[in-house]
Image (tube, rainbow, N blue to C red):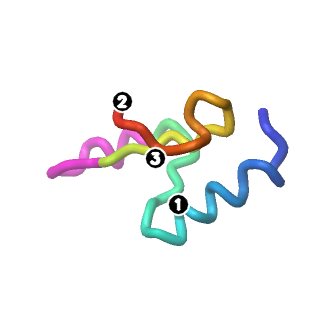
Amino acid sequence: MYPAEIVMPMKAELTNNGFQDLNDATKVADALKQSGTTLLVINSVCGCAAGAARPG
């Protein structure tokens, strides 16, 4: 697990721009059950994803 001081700024940037914080499996499952299109962003601080959100 990464320290909160590293993750929190990226998390805040996403939630300040309208993303919901889905921090457990039940919330993710519920969000994916909704009708329509869903964009799921994985907040990651590793080198492969920290620079930009990329389509999966």
Is label 2 in a helix, a strand or a loop? loop
Q: Earlier in the sequence, mark 3 or mark 1?
A: 1
Q: Is residue 46 left or right of residue 2?
A: left
Q: How many marks?
A: 3
Up-down relation of residue 41 to residue 15 (above or below): above
Residue range (magenta): 28-38
At x 83% / y 54%, what residue is drawn? Answer: 5
Q: Say the numbered circle drawn on residue 44.
A: none
Image coords of residue 23 (percent x, y): 57, 46
Is label 1 in a helix, a strand or a loop? helix
Image coords of residue 32 (percent x, y): 30, 42
| Image depth: mark 3 or mark 1 in front | 1
Q: Say the numbered circle drawn on residue 27.
A: 3
Residue occupied by mark 2: 56
At x 58% / y 64%, what residue is drawn? Answer: 13
Residue occupied by mark 1: 14
